[in-house]
Amino acid sequence: MTPIDRFIVEFDTALRSVVGGANAQRPTPGSESGANAALDSEQRKHAAGLMRINHVGEVCAQALYQSQKLVARNSEIKEMLDRSGQEEMDHLAWCETRLKELGSHTSYLNPFWYAGSFAIGLAAGLAGDKWSLGFVAETEKQVESHLESHLKKLPEEDHRSRAIVDQMRMDEIEHGQAALHAGGANLPEPIQKIMQAMSKVMTATAYKI
């Protein structure tokens, strides 16, 4: 792939992350379940808020992986980030589809989430591959915990959303482990705390906007 081709691919990924239209390579989990089976209006609204948070998380993931790939020193690490990013694109598409089924929308602040995450990912990447990978591992660890909490909060009747979130959770575990195996370093505790605080702001905002 030429540099121009690569630029076009990455630009398309960024555009789809921000404005919508992500394409999944894997089928949506829970496709056999009815789109809104047994859900009342309040349950759909609550599920949509949670799935919007998850969608924002995937917008951020695309920005992080794209920025870190730009400055990765090792070609194997770039390939690993690329593979993980492709699976995260599946997540993005699944969440977008589910939001439409629930009669809701993605976050209106997606351009802001993407830009901020891109800058953070770039900074982590410039710090060196081991810290970049450590950032990926810690991010995925926090996302895994976050998704587990959503499995407890989603309506029991919402089998479709729950199937999507559970598959995402399993993928995030694999991404985090891959980053550690590739040489990721454990981030200092203060940075972990800052990441957790930023995540709380994002989730509280994305649930509504």
Image (spheres, grey):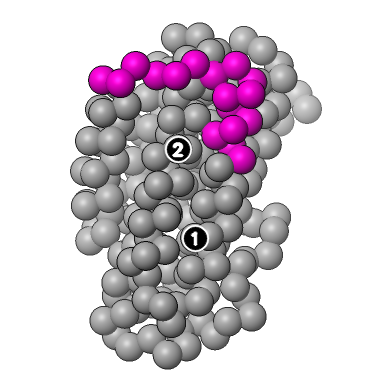
Specify whether 123 is left or right of 209: right
The image position of residue 114, as x and y in percent, is 39, 38
Q: Quadrant of residue 75?
A: top right
Q: How many marks?
A: 2
Answer whether residue 83 is visible to the viewer in this image: yes
Magenta segment: does it hold 59? no
Q: Quadrant of residue 43?
A: bottom left
Q: Which element is circle 2 on?
A: helix
Check whether the beta carbons of the residues at disc 1 and disc 2 lie within 8 A of each other: no
Q: Which element is circle 1 on?
A: helix
Magenta segment: does it hold 177? yes
Residue wearing tag 2: 141
Residue at image point 47% right, 88% down? 37
Q: Quadrant of the N terminus?
A: top right
Counting other residues with Cα less than 10 Å from the Cα at mark 2, is it few (<14), some (14-19), or many (20 or more)? some
- The amino acid on which the numbered mark 2 sits, given as a three-letter code, is Lys
Q: Earlier in the sequence, mark 1 or mark 2?
A: 2
Residue wearing tag 1: 165
